[in-house]
Amino acid sequence: MSAPQEQRDPRGLRMAAPRDEATLEKERQALVQLAGRPPLARFRGYLGLLGPGYLQSAMTLGGGTVSAALFAGAIFGYQLLWVAPFAMAMGVCMLAAVSWQTLSTGERPWPAMKRHAGPFFAWSWAIGALLSSVIWQFAQYALASAVLVDIADVLGLPGLSPILAGALVLVWALGVSSLYGRSDRWVRVYEIFLQCMVWGIVACFGWVVFQTGISDWGELFRGFFTFQIPDDRNGIAAFTLILSGLSAAVGVNMVFLYPYTLLAKGWGRAHRELSRFDLGFGMFLPYTIAVSLVVIATANTLHLDPAYDGARLSPVEAAHVLAQGVGPGAGRLVFGLGVLGMALSSITLQMLTCGFVGVELFGLSVGSSRHRLATWLPIPGVLGCVFWSEIAIWVAIPTNIICGIFLPAAYFGFCILQRSRAYLGDDRPSGASGTAWLAAMYAITLFLVAFLAWYIV
């Protein structure tokens, strides 16, 4: 069956296989009907339409996230549980603005930013998204290959080399990432697959926490709601982990991918409320639950392990320690599957991001052979399983911070777009709520700049 004729829309995303207009119209009518129904009915209706938010969850639940969470729990116990929901809440505020702008105008965000905010912000955003997606692949492959080797050992298949494990991950990533953009059906299959993977990660770590239990419920509550920053001899480590967590929760490559997945699904003005719901229940909720479970699991085991000195931690070492509380073999397998799922989902979505960056920077058509080649730009990251296979997981922490440097430029660009009447017209948020929203966006951006500058200095 031949691919549908390519659509070229100067405002929207150029699609190789645009969604069927009849299906989209039916979806729009359903959303209009849902808008007038009670909250519970809208909730049930929206649940069946989630998609882009789950892609963001799957992308951010990767090596950077698991690294920051493992160290936070191992060194500080429950004290830094607030970082994940706080960081993701800031990200949701910014991505809600991105979705509002994209769905209100229907314009591709990169040329819109270049035209209305300035080339500096647009190029910083695109280059940051491309570089962070490529750089992160090294850590993701190192992480995936290490836990895959350990999983093979648990399953009675010893001798799997990190290089072969990395090759298997690469083949898997190439196959899965190629699904996106082929057709509306394959896009939906891809999104359902990632939804299952995200909740599978949550289930794995939830089982570990269930088996290890909660050591102190009062301390758990304080960890979520009192915004503790340890000031003992590990104080600088705490600030490092906080900054790493902020950078990993919503990375600059995520900010680039998100609006393009909205356009690729054919979403428009009628989907604006759905997009906010999608960010809350597709991104914020699973991310917060998954990261909190990782912190709690390691706090229940590594933090209480007198043999752990806080200086080094590999995912395999973490799995072995967790196995002491969960059971030999089972603990390693469940923890390893959760970490492997994090790495695999991030690898494929970072490849997808590079493809969309290629669409803008090189004028490629989505679904073309050159677009496929652009998604392969991160392939050199497979070398991470060769050169980083024996390096502790803390290498992901500085990678988080380096990639986080590009984020404020993108955020400033979207702040400018949010207040641009030439771009948004009558859709520019106004009144008290619009002013508060814009003020929150600027506050988040300035907070990241100040925190990053303070840490570097």
Image (cartoon, rainbow, N blue to C red):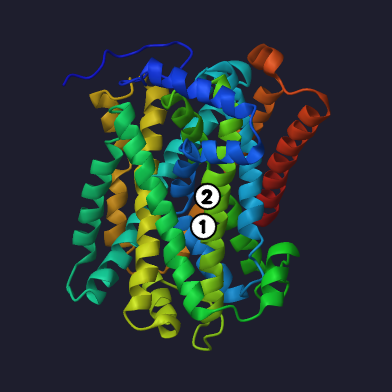
Q: Which residue is rendered at x = 39% and y = 62% of the image?
A: 339
Answer whether residue 270 is visible to the viewer in this image: yes
Q: Which residue is rendered at x = 26% and y = 60% of the image?
A: 386
**How far apart are the two marked residues, 2 and 1, measured between alpha carbons?**
6 Å
Q: What residue type is labelled 2?
A: Ile
* Up/down of 429 relative to 237, above or below: above
Q: Which residue is rendered at x = 55% and y = 59% of the image?
A: 289
Q: What residue type is labelled 1?
A: Pro
Question: Could you tell me residue 159's position as x and y percent?
Answer: 17, 73
In the rendered image, which residue does mark 2 sit on?
A: 402
Mark 2, Cα crowd under 10 Å, few <14 / some 14-19 / many 20+, is: some
Q: Residue 44 carries which label?
A: none
* Up/down of 180 relative to 295, above or below: above
Q: Nearer the viewer, residue 5 or 440?
A: 5
The secondary structure type at the circle numbered 2 is: helix
Question: Could you tell me residue 202's position as x and y percent?
Answer: 46, 60
Q: Nearer the viewer, residue 267 or 423?
A: 267
Using residue 165 as the reference point, say whether residue 147 is left or right of it: right
Instruction: Kindly check if marks 2 and 1 are in contact, taking CB atoms under 8 A apart as contact.
Output: yes
- Split into 4 quadrants, where in the image is the N terminus? top left
Count of residue discs = 2
The secondary structure type at the circle numbered 1 is: helix
* Up/down of 98 relative to 15, above or below: below
Question: Could you tell me residue 450's position as x and y percent?
Answer: 72, 47
Question: Could you tell me residue 274's position as x and y percent?
Answer: 57, 32
In the rendered image, which residue does mark 1 sit on?
A: 398
Answer whether residue 302 is visible to the viewer in this image: no
- Split into 4 quadrants, where in the image is the C terminus? bottom right
Using residue 104 as the reference point, say whether residue 129 is left or right of it: left
